[in-house]
Image (cartoon, helix red, strand yellow):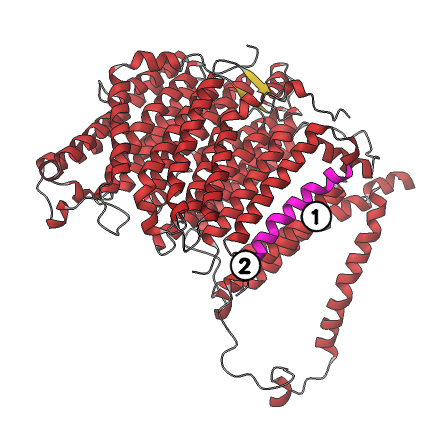
Amino acid sequence: MSLPEMSALFPTLQEVIFVLFALLIAVTSLIAAMAPNLFHNALGLVATLFGIAGIYFMLEAEFVGVSQILVYIGAIATLITFAIMLTRGMMFGRTSAMNRQGLAGAIISGLFFVVLLGIVFQVPWPNVVADITDGEALIANLGALFVSTYLLPFELLALLLLVALTGALLLARDR
Amino acid sequence: MLQNYLFVLILSTVALIIPVAAIVLGHFLGPRRPDPIKTATYESGVETIGDTWVQFRAQYYLIGLIFLIFDVEVIFLFPIALAFERLSLLSTLAVVTFVLILLLGLLVEWRKGALEWE
Amino acid sequence: METTLDLSTLNLAVVLPELTLIVFAILVMAADVFATPKNPAPRQWTPWIALAGVVAAAIVNLSVSGREVTLFQGAAILDKFAVGLNYIILLATGLGILLSVKYIPRINKQVGEYYALTLLTATGMMMMGAALDLITLFLALEIFSLALYILSGLNRTSPRSTEAAIKYFLLGAFSSAFFAYGGALIYAGTGTTQYYGIAQVTAAGLANTPLLYAGIALLVAGFGFKVSLVPFHSWTPDVYQGAPTPVTAFMSVGTKAAAFAAFFRVMLVALPFSYGAWSMPLALLAVITMAVGNFAALQQRSLKRMLAYSSIAHAGYILTALAGGAAEGADAALFYLFTYAFMNIGAFAVVMALEEMGAEDAMQDRAKGLGKTHPIMAFLMAIFMFGLSGMPPLAGFYGKVLLFEAAVAGGMIWLAIAAVAFTAVGAVYYLRVIANMYFADPVDESADEVNRSLPLDVGLAIAVAGTILVGVFPGFWMNAFQQSMALFGG
């Protein structure tokens, strides 16, 4: 084979990075679900969220990637850590992630995975033709969309946050 | 445009590898001669008295939760701020309504004493 | 990119009922904030402000009904279906508030937040019926779900209540994730999240079918959790039993009504051209749901758990109308949910009265001998039990008739027959309560004490009046709910 044909066999840099991110997400999410130490679970979650942010950047959805890091890791993962420290699980070191339904859960999740895999291979994925070159204007367009086409969901979001604030008052205070 | 992020990726990978390498190399290459004083927990100042595990205050959690909610608000306000010049009057009113609803929530939190520390 | 918003499409009439509730929720919060330890009076007003809000929203709903308009060309719609759903939600909310007036202060002093959250829950539920776009739908779903998770855990000193909140939250968050995944796959398969857009794409055959079907499956899973279909029902008994009873009463009707309304609208407006794909799976789900719901309810010793399993069975009945795929199914479901509101909340109100002081649940033994000790209460419960089991001439009978007619109209005759069979099985546990009340002797002395209060009595009166009147004059109500949904293409 000539050199161009051979180089087509090797994965592109983008594919390599994608596979690495996907591996990171898979492994750390398993840690987040199954590690015996509660704090390791939280750290696994943080690493998973970083991996997902990386995938967002690869899809050129920069705003979503940045908000993933700012909100998910910056606020939610911190909150989860606080919640872990509130419980006494940390004091005892080891907790078990499995209950008596581990086998049934594993079988059903495996089936779900197989079904999803089948769908992934069956779907006629369209080819992406256009390259996104807008840059900063993309985020400005997103902002304009929030208050034009998606105005109703935007205001509903304010209500949802208000519900969360009221819930914080009802449930999260020291008695 | 994706090329720009390659730099960020390489930087993060290097930033991850160097501390990990330092710890791992130190673990394997350093001499191991433990004695009671060396293995005691390092604490500058006075020796600790009593149990180190104290009950964590729920106030930390509440403040973190309120921070989360307003962080989400900021995330949504950010793109709107970028598009501010071309918004119509109706859209601007919608943004003001959004902020007002959350301001109302903050007001209720304040008056209910959720923002107190003690 | 077109970013200006045309003011002519700002048909505020679509969201006016919800806006009314939001304004009153703000008033409730204001009243709560102005109450100081020296002057606690404003906090006492909050239930009445909330009730006034419900009545005001109903009046607003009445005044905007009769038109068919969409908001912003496709974010939300106001048609007879949405108006009908609003009435059902407001009825459930009003009855729930009446039940809570004396109950809630006993378990949690923060009464103001409770009523504000109730009104916001109702807003989210009403929005579910009006949503015409998957994103709006998802946000409305999250609003009322989040509020209900919080309300379930209201009794902070009770481990049962906390358990209910955690179970509801964990499973609900999971189901919301499936819902979002399904919505995303539908978007990937059709290129739009608006119902009319999806219908257009599927009608023209341009949809990416494997993605679309996967999306529909996940969406059904998400909805199935909310309406307690089997096998997504495992949260229902524990949450219904653990949550404070007024919250359970409100939640049992409200979530079903809102989620079924959205379910019907998504399936009949957005996905009618995929009917061949989803009709049989939904029919099978309906059969399993009716089976598990009815047979499990037979074995319950706790009244609240029995009512929980009965509500699962009722979800199965309503699903038969959807599996038929006929447009009459939507009208039948609305009528059934309307009657269900009266009967179910009435039943929970009687359970509330039967709960021993400080307990959060009433066992079936508490109903024994009620016919002798409290004949009026027993009579009311008998009416609710007869109604739920579908006995004529009470409201439940006509509701079931309409539902099964809709299933037959869609060609699912076997399903209707199965549903009637399960209804007969279901009658057993309802009749057992009645038999306990009239033919058994009281278990112990505590049978003499029941919790009564004026608002509870008013709620009971409304519930029983509704059950009887809608049953005796069904024609008026059935016509009110006819041809309600605005389908794609007219």
Residue that appears at 22% across and 18% down: C393
Percent x, y of residue C472: 24, 16
Q: Is residue C283 visible?
A: no
- In this rendering, would A138 be left or right of A37? right
> Residue under circle 1?
A53
Residue that appears at 62% across and 89% down: B37
Percent x, y of residue A68: 67, 47
Question: Looking at the rendered structure, which numbered label has been put on residue C143?
Answer: none
**Chain under numbered label 2:** B
Disc 1 marks a residue whose amino acid type is Ala
> Residue under circle 2?
B61
- In this rendering, would C312 be left or right of C272? left
- In this rendering, would B75 be left or right of C138? right
Percent x, y of residue A130: 81, 30
Q: Is residue A122 visible?
A: yes
Disc 2 marks a residue whose amino acid type is Tyr
**Mark 2 → mark 1, Cα distance in angstroms:** 25 Å
Q: Quadrant of the C terminus of chain C?
A: top right
Q: Quadrant of residue C191?
A: top right
* Residue interval drawn in magenta: B62-83
For label 1, the SS is: helix
Q: Quadrant of the N terminus of chain C?
A: top right
**Mark nearer the viewer, 2 or 1:** 2
Q: Give the crowd class for mark 2: few <14, some 14-19, many >=20 residues within 10 Å.
A: many
Magenta span includes C317: no
**Chain under numbered label 1:** A
Magenta span includes B79: yes
